[in-house]
Image (cartoon, rainbow, N blue to C red):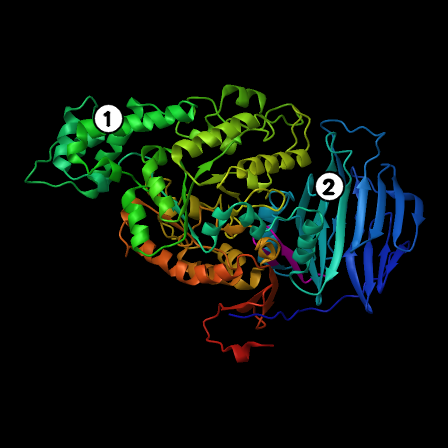
Amino acid sequence: MKLTFSSLGLLLLVSAPSFALTLKQGDQHWQIDPDTLAIILKQDSQTFAINQGCLQIDGQTQQATQLTQSAEQATWTLKPSGVQVSAQLQQGLNIDFRWPSAHEIERQAPKALRWFDLSEASTQTLLLPFDEGMRVPTDNPTWTRYLIDNHSGANTTQDLKMPFWSAQQGEHFISYQLLNATNNQLHFSEQQNKLDLQAEHWFTPLNQSEPFSVRITVGDEMLAGAKAYRDWREAAGLRVSLAEKRKANPQIEKMIGASHVYLFGRDLIAVQDVVDWWGLRDWFWRSEFTPSPELQKELASLKKGQDWLNQYQKKLLVGEINQALNQKFNANQASIQAQYQAAQQRKAWLTEHAGAYLKPSDQWGQGLAQPMISTLQQAGLSKLWLGLDNWMPAFYQPQVVDSAKQAGYLIGVYDSYNTAIEKGINDSWLTAQLPDRMRENCAIEKADGTLQLGFRGNGFYLNPACELGYVKQRVQDILHFGHFNSLFLDVDGTAMAREDYRSRSNETAMLAAFNTRMQDIANTPKLILGSEDGNALTTQGLVFAHGMETVGFGWTDQAMKSDKQSPYYLGNWYPDEKPDFFFKSAQVKEPYRSLLFAPEYKVPLYQAVFHDELISSHHWHSDSLKFSNVKAVRDLRAMLFNTPAMVHLSRDETRKNSARIEQLKHYQQGFLPLHEQLWDKALVDFRWLDKQGQVQQTRFSDGSILSANFSAQPRLSSQEEK
């Protein structure tokens, strides 16, 4: 696999503003209009349009006063706002905006600083880290419409996965890094048949003492902005390499080369655990439980020796037994110990009363079961991260978790502390069953005085700085009773920054709280911590993250969401042990197929920053097998960028030659040896080897080169170099 980039388009000469100050350093001449912040750069006999004059504060144009200047630095004050501005040449152009301390900002009247307007006439391509990395031609109307519809209004902490973007002008790339990434918004629009981008920063009562700072740099490659950001993180002491993390926690060795697997199913027994269906049916009819009308309709008239149970009837009977046990031994208490005891009571009771019709109880389980672990071992799968979305399966069978660990696997569970709901709303949502005091005292208060509604409008979102003692204790209880050696902490890694007027904490403080919480948990001996996305501003303590390589899309698209006859329909969220949404194959429709998966529109921006710092894979909504018409492209890209596959499994995959197990073997064969070589190496180069971007190449810091041919035409390496 290999790659080289041929840049397109000519630089447009841009005239300097009529009133400009000039900062000089080497061969760079930065001309700045302090009234409008129009900026051009002259370098090597070339002129670059850095920023169009768009400066407004609180909707008003400004006038520069009190201007002072040296060769490499200038300061001025804007009127009427009083905002103080400084511009300095230091590893690029650094611009700081400071709100005047004498001007108090009202709680519901934040002040908008509109500072950036892309020079769309001079720009051919935008590089945007809304996922691993998007390459967006600015004259492509489909891209323009997509970004306007899906990303206009985006913030730069959670939505933009890293706080920078790059604009290509000819063969150079101008990168804009937000040194203060909070309280920002990006706005996309169409101007003269081209994509335009504007950016603004909001000063609020909670952040007005913080300056807003941006750094502008110019490079000659697609990864220039990512490399500049990586260098900045290194200089700021924010980067902790995987090699350093492994020294502190040798268990990380088990993540190197591992594919990622989610095991589905939350209940005690599966269809595969039954050995006597007629006996089990008759027992259930005699038991203290009452079969549902649907079950009676399906099974009551069947006669042994004349009839048999079909697969639907078997699932129905097992499902009702599990449901009856769940209700008899309720596990909806907040105490993790009580939930563990309920799980063990269900198992003991069913063994005593119906064990004669079932396999031995140590073999029971839906996704997590001893037969599953044995199958993975027999298939020769040596390195895996196994994940559960609920800890109850491990509470039923902690010895199976031990078996997985003995096989050399990492096994973890989903946990979250970001939404709290009242009892009775959704008692099966165990992670949200938090103490009343957390829901009442930790809920985020918005500027208008209302509380921030939680996930999908349920309960409330919580401040991550609140009740850390409870969080740490619950995590320890989950690890103790579930025997896990890994944990997936939902949301914390997404940089979901909000202001909280209850605690008067701003977005910067909230990001720090997420990082503190993750690091505290990661300090648990021998624990491997992961989270959602792994956004650049919330990575402390993380070894892996899920979400960056395939992000969610088309949430409101009816063909994907509702039309069950559509080839693009993603599937139902049931049955629980194997939801169609996660297991049903679907196609990706246009424009998503082209924009989000075509190789010419993808750039490894995230890997250029984080490849040797944390391991990233897909969001669990979109495992490696989900999308049939882009599977080959996703697999090739994963090899090229050196990222692991993700595969979902259910109990019916407990055959070493099942389709999904075979896929895992295939992924291990390709990924494991490469990642063992490259896990601690930086991705240092990305290029195209043809003009269409169908043949691509990555290079790593040890000199290793990976090349991928996404086209249908065979290519020889000797013919590809440009």
The residue segment tinted magenta is 123-135
Q: Residues within 10 Å of mark 1 (few under 14, many from 20)?
A: few
Residue 457's tag is none
Label 2 sits on a secondary structure element that is: strand
Question: Hey, what amino acid is under mark 2?
Answer: His
Label 1 sits on a secondary structure element that is: helix
How many numbered markers are drawn?
2
Identify which residue, 377 or 286, lies in the foreground.
377
Nearer mark to the viewer, of 1 and 2: 1
**Side of 411 relative to 654 (left or right):** right
On the image, the x and y values in percent for residue 637 come to 50, 61
Identify the residue position indicated by label 2 in the image: 201
Residue at 64% over, 36% down:
512
Identify the residue position indicated by label 1 in the image: 349
Question: First in sequence: mark 1 or mark 2?
Answer: 2
246 vs 633: above or below:
above
87 vs 169: above or below:
above
Q: Residues within 10 Å of mark 2 (few under 14, many from 20)?
A: many
Instruction: Locate residue 427: give its quadrant.
Output: top left
24 vs 2: above or below:
above
Please tell me whether residue 271 belongs to the stretch shown in magenta.
no
Residue at 46% over, 76% down:
714
On the image, the x and y values in percent for residue 488 come to 48, 40
Q: What's the CA distance linking mark 1 and mark 2?
A: 60 Å
Residue at 24% over, 35% down:
361
Q: Quadrant of the C terminus?
A: bottom right
| Residue that protrudes farthest toward the left in the picture | 305
On the image, the x and y values in percent for residue 117 come to 74, 51
352 vs 646: above or below:
above
Residue at 32% over, 33% down:
396
Identify which residue, 327 or 9, lies in the foreground.
327
